[in-house]
Image (cartoon, rainbow, N blue to C red):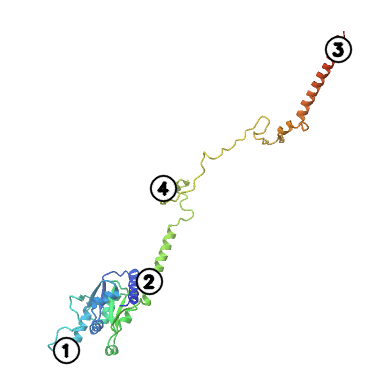
Amino acid sequence: MRARRSKKYRKIMSAYQMSFSFREPYQVLLDSHFLKTCHSFHMPLQKYLENTLHGECRLFVTRCTLAKIMGDWEKVKNKEGKGRGPPRPEFLPPPTEVPLRHCKHKDDEGQELGVVSEARCLLDLLAGQPHGHEHAKNKQHYILATADADDKESRAKGFVDVKDRARLIPGVPIVYVKRSVMILEEMSGVSERSVRSQEKEKFSQGLIGLSSRKRKRGEGEDESDDGDDDLLPEKQGPKIRGMKKAKGPNPLSVKKRKVKVLSSNGAGRDGAAVEGEVPRKKPTRRGTRGQRQAGNKTTPDNNVDGEARQTTASATASAGTATTEVQAPIHEA
């Protein structure tokens, strides 16, 4: 088998596994045309089917299919005059390789039928024998292995193409032989629509479940008026490692808040005015370091001190002159 074809078949079977729950070993139903075609092309059944389906397989033949094969073989023996020929045809494998699958068929009234036609037997097993308004469903996860019928058989009256009817049943993989090549058919349109409808149902159920879990307005208000119930660990949900909430600032590094204390004059420490009083302008303090060094630039307080110093100097000067005037005549005498 080519790599591209093998990859395609693997994808098809994985789609059946995910959508219709197919599991290994796969149950494969063989019809008479498939057995004849494989025998004519010398194709081992077990090996070729496992390579095509990419998994372990269990091959089965129904009781109705076996009855049809044996009936056709008896006709061939009578026509060729081989009354003492082999009891089984060459294309029919032994029961050890392909065991018999028991099948029951009932009519509309519920009565059991015996052996029916091969096409009806296979379709009943694939569809699950629905009753009433039930939809056909491949409950047992069968895989149909078939081949094209002979021209003589296809032209016969009442011929039913099993492959075409099986495409109308959702979830039925079909394997057929064409020119000595075993082919796995792609998923039919009915199966694809069934998969899409299942996905829509699952999606809608998920939305309904989410809406039912949402809390409506007004619910739970009478039960708990306090907000302490929301802080319980049961209602908070699971904690996630690494995710931490934002914390407040460090209280040791935060500057303390200043408290305004009213003084006796009605203003605070920072000079803020009290209501009902006119705020007093705070005097501005200017630097006097440069003014002390420069004598021409003096403040009003310094001017007062300078005048006092000048008066004391003038007084001392006048007193000195007076003493000199008194002492002068003494030296002359």
Q: CA distance from mark 2 to mark 4?
A: 42 Å
**Along the line of sight, the residue nearer the viewer: 183 or 76:** 183
Q: Amino acid at mark 2?
A: Val
Mark 3, secondary structure of its residue: helix
| Contact? badges 2 and 4 (CB < 8 Å) | no
Mark 4, secondary structure of its residue: helix
Q: CA distance from mark 3 to mark 1?
A: 188 Å
Q: Residue furthest front?
A: 332
**Along the line of sight, the residue nearer the viewer: 322 or 183:** 322
Badge 2 is on which residue?
Answer: 195
Residue 206 position within the rendered picture, expressed as x and y whole percent measured from the top left = 41, 63
Badge number at residue 77: 1
Q: CA distance from mark 2 to mark 1?
A: 48 Å
Side (left or right) of 207 relative to 97: right
Which quadrant would residue 54 be assigned to in this image? bottom left
The quarter of the rendered structure image containing the N terminus is bottom left
Badge 4 is on which residue?
Answer: 233
